[in-house]
Every structure is written in C-alpha cells, then in structure tokens.
Amino acid sequence: MLAVRAEDTQPVCQYVKEGFNLAYVNDSDVGLKTDLITINPTQIQREFKNLKKNPDPLVKRVSVYGNASLAMPAFAYTFCTALSVSVLKVLHPVRPQQPVVFFNPTYLRTLDRFWKSRGLKEVRLSSGFILISTALELCENVHVYGFWPFGNDLQDNPVPYHYYDQLSPHRYMHAMPEEFVRLLQLHSKGALTLHLQPCSSDNF
C-alpha cells in the first residue's frame, strides 16, 4: 500500500495517512488507519458495474476506512465525471460522515505543468505522486511508504504493482520509475523521507 504520512503543527497536517485506489487495509504492514482514500473512476467501471442498482458492495468496501474522505479525479477526463458523481450520489445518503471530494481540475493542470516543466514526461501523474505533491505543499514533515515502481524489491523478491490485485501499471499513462527518481531527489534534499524497507506497525 502506498501511504503518505504527514506531520506538522498545522491542524490539517498533524497526522494524515493517505491510501490509494481503494486499497484494502489489514493488520500487516499495510496498517489499519487512513484519513484519505483515492478512488480511480476506472475502478468503479471495473469492479462496481451495477452501482446504481446494487450500491452495497461499494458501501461495504468504503466503510472499512471509517470516516476517511474519498477523493476522486472527477474532471480528469470526460468519462470520469459521471462515474464520480454517481459515487457521490450513492454514498452521501448512507455515509454522510464519509465525504466524497473531487480534485480541483485547475490544481491538477497546474501540478501537471509544474512537473512537466521539470522534465517529468507522462500522460498523467499517478494518484500517489499527486497526493505526495499536495502533502509537500501543506506539511513540513512528509514520509512516503510503499512507492516502489519495480518488479523486485531491494532483496530481489517479486513485488506486485498493487498488493491487493493482479493489475500491472499502465505504461502508457504513468511513468512510475521517473516519478520515483523525483522522489529520490526530494529525499536527498530533505524535502521528504522516502521509506524503502518493510514497514513495522510503529509506522502506522
């Protein structure tokens, strides 16, 4: 699970742990607590095809995150808007304590231009990289766990792209190794702390 922990004197940053793309939480090194979860609209297409008629699977899936906010790129592409609005309409009546929020499209465009001007060439920034960038804007101390774009870890053990499914990275959309290089550069400058070893429960 890619997780971002941000700590700061600002109330919004005292403790924020972000999870991505409806990742499952458990009592392993993934951790049990999260404050923000992203939902990729393509997940709704793929996993919750009959959302309007049968919302229960999605409601059950998001309920494990407690009151964590659910963030969606509703305006990234035209097809994302209707899917994101349908999630909002389904979840708000039954889980009003768990807000569904949409990324500001102007902010996403600005962030995309910022990184492209610094040599990062990809069709779309990954969800993880977007929220790491956001955390860096808001918080003084940012710790990143689980951002590893390669097929094997430092001990040469195989590592899945997502620990909870068999999907492979979308090579046309994202340039994960290039994003990783930028995170290494930020780590070397002290802008964030990039954790590459297995996590312990103390981290979460």
Image: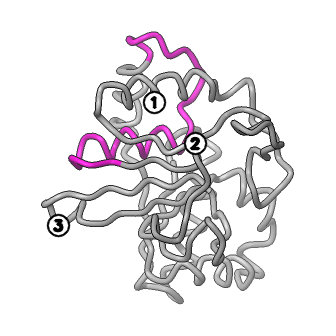
Query: Residue 79: horizontal and vertical position, in percent?
Result: 65, 45
Residue at horizontal 41 percent and vertical 22 percent from the top: 185
Q: Earlier in the sequence, mark 1 or mark 3?
A: 3
State the residue position of label 3. Answer: 11
Q: In the image, which is nearer the foreground, mark 1 or mark 3?
A: 1
Query: Residue 113: horizontal and vertical position, in percent?
Result: 39, 20
Residue 175 included in the magenta stretch of the image:
no
Circles 1, 2 touching at the beta carbon (< 8 Å): yes
Q: Quadrant of residue 50?
A: bottom right
Label 1 Cα crowd, 10 Å radius (few <14 / some 14-19 / many 20+): many
Query: Residue 176: horizontal and vertical position, in percent?
Result: 62, 29
Colouring mode (rainbow / by chain / secondary structure / one colour): one colour
Circles 2, 3 touching at the beta carbon (< 8 Å): no
Q: CA distance from mark 1 to mark 3?
A: 25 Å
Label 2, secondary structure: give it. loop
State the residue position of label 1. Answer: 183
- The three-letter amino acid code for the residue at tag 3 is Pro
Task: Using the image, determine if residue 1 lies above or below residue 55.
Answer: above
Label 1, secondary structure: give it. helix
**The magenta segment:** 116-142
- The three-letter amino acid code for the residue at tag 2 is Phe
State the residue position of label 2. Answer: 147
Residue 186 or 47: which is nearer the viewer?
Answer: 186
Residue 138 included in the magenta stretch of the image:
yes
Q: CA distance from mark 2 to mark 3?
A: 26 Å
